[in-house]
Image (spheres, rainbow, N blue to C red):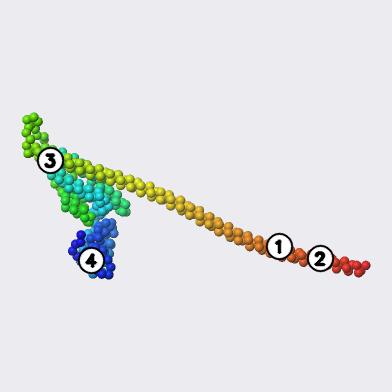
Amino acid sequence: MQREGGRGRDTGDHDVEPVESVLDELYATPPSDFVARREEHAAAARTDGRKEDARAIHAARRPTSAAWAANLLRRSRPEESRRFLELGQALREAHRTLDAAGLKELSAQRRRIVSALSRQAAQLAREAGHQLSQAAQQEVESTLRAVLADPDAADQWAGGRLAGSLTPPSEFPSDTAPAEPPPRELPRPDTRRRTPADRGRDELAERRRKRQEELARAEQAAEKAARQLADRRAEEADAEASLRRTDEEHDRAREEVSAAERRLGQAHEELDRAERERRKAEERRRTAAGALSRAEREARETAREVDRLAGRVR
């Protein structure tokens, strides 16, 4: 949905990113990078002449680590977040209608779901390169409890742009339930007549049963999501280990190929040198053979000349 301030306008020269999209991006950005990215977008809007957009972007507050992690959970787990918001509606209705025993049971289940989702938020933050402190993770849990208890807090978290953590209202206890009143003695079944109050209690019990079923389904979904997240983390760790082993084997093979190529190059050089030496030796042999032939001819001619001269002397 667009708001005032010219969000989503086109300057006519190029496409302009809507302010809502810019804000969504900013609140998905780690807090350490938030201010720099905000100023980049604000400067771009001012350059385009969109002064109202620039003011709206510049007014965005840098989120705390806990608020950023809660935003990250909302955006990275849309289906689980939707079920969590629906669970909050059911719990608020149950808080208005259930008795003390029912509220006590719901409180225990609520704590387990909030704890599971806060661990998911911390894991998502780690995967994004940021480790949440213990205090920040507790603030994430406080925010999630507020989402369950307060419809305004649920709307804020649903927008995915929290700048700070949320606090649950005191009238919606997160850990305790009011003391259960002592049971009233009921008339004997065979003499008791059903009254409008009886029918109201039956309807209340039925609503309680439905709310408990909805809560149980939501809890099962959260636990399933937590298991799936653990499985995905294990698969990712295995894949990373396999990739490291493959990289090491690839590096070794590349080194062996390089060494073999160097040896092959040296062998080619040795072969070239041997070929040159062989050609030189062959040339020397031919030269020596020619000189030998000439020397033999000269020796024969000299011997004949000696014989001829010796005959004349006799």
The disc placed on residue 285 is 1
| Image position, residue 259 (x, y; %) | 52, 55
- Three-letter code for the amino acid on which mark 4 is drawn: Arg
- Three-letter code for the amino acid on which mark 2 is drawn: Ala
Between the residue at mark 1 and the residue at mark 2, the CA separation in whole angstroms equals 21 Å
Q: Nearer the viewer, mark 2 or mark 4?
A: 4
Seen at 8% across and 32% down, the residue is 186
* Label 1: element kind: helix
Left of 230 or right of it: where is 197? left
Q: Which residue is mark 3?
A: 204
The disc placed on residue 9 is 4
- Three-letter code for the amino acid on which mark 3 is drawn: Leu
Please say if the residues under marks 1 and 3 sit with CB atoms less than 8 Å apart. no
Left of 261 or right of it: where is 246? left
Q: Which residue is mark 2?
A: 299
Quadrant assignment, res 96: top left
Quadrant assignment, res 55: bottom left
Between the residue at mark 1 and the residue at mark 4, the CA separation in whole angstroms equals 92 Å
| Image position, residue 199 (x, y; %) | 9, 38
Between the residue at mark 1 and the residue at mark 3, the CA separation in whole angstroms equals 119 Å
Q: Residues within 10 Å of mark 4 (few under 14, many from 20)?
A: some
Seen at 63% across and 62% down, the residue is 276
